[in-house]
Image (cartoon, rainbow, N blue to C red):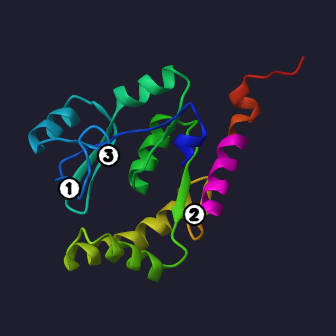
Amino acid sequence: MLRDRLEDAVISVSCTTRKPRGEEKDGVDYHFVEAATFERMVSEGDFAEWATVHGERYGTPRSEIEGHLSERRVVIFDIDVQGGEQILAAYPGAVMVLIFPPSFEVLEERLRGRSTDDEKTIQRRLSKAREEMRRGLGSYNYLVVNDELQVAFANLESIVRAERCRITRLGATPS
């Protein structure tokens, strides 16, 4: 929704070693790569952030970020908290927004409703979510609760618009 509302916003497409789920498309949802390719990219320093999550590897190519930033775009990441912390270390001006479900029970309902994961995977995701929520509260700048989609979106859009007005981003100096 943010990408649709802001003409200069783009979603960063991460690489992953996992198989596509449902109707995911290579190059749109993720760049689906073999483990050996991912490992080569890690060893060559191609990722701004990468991690093993739920038994699979995910990473964001530096080239993708740098290309968007050179065009002065708003780059949106859909990554876990440890990845977000790596992005913040690599790009100290990054704005970190943590998206929370309205409750842990709702998160479980949403995971089950996707019908893409087996029970073991759902339990692993739920366990990891508790840790991620706690960690994110200590390192991110903002929190948006995704209860009512329109309200959550309005809050996210407000954060982006406010950050665009930050004096340090505008390069304004006193005369």
User: Disc 3 to disc 1, how far (Cα)?
Assistant: 15 Å
Residue segment shown in magenta: 149-162
Between 131 and 18, the residue placed more toward the observer is 18
Location of residue 7 by image quarter = top right
Q: Position of residue 81 (x, y in %)?
A: 43, 56
At x 56%, y 45%, the residue is: 2
Residue in the image at 39% along x and 49% along y: 83
**Kind of residue at disc 2:** Leu
Q: Is residue 33 above or below residue 151?
A: above
Identify the residue at horizontal 32%, vertical 69% (top origin). Answer: 114
Q: How many C-alpha atoms fall within 10 Å of the one at disc 2: few (<14), some, or many (≥20)?
A: few
Mark 2 or mark 3, earlier in chain: 3
| Mark 1 or mark 2, whichever is nearer to me | 2
> What residue sits right under mark 2 in the picture?
149
Residue 29 disc label: 3
Residue type for callout 3: Asp
User: How far apart are labels 2 and 3 at the CA level?
Assistant: 21 Å
In percent of width and height, residue 50 lies at 30, 45
Q: Which residue is mark 1?
A: 56
Give the side of residue 50 with respect to residue 72, left or right: left
Q: Does the magenta segment cover residue 80?
A: no
Which residue is the extreme one toward the right?
175
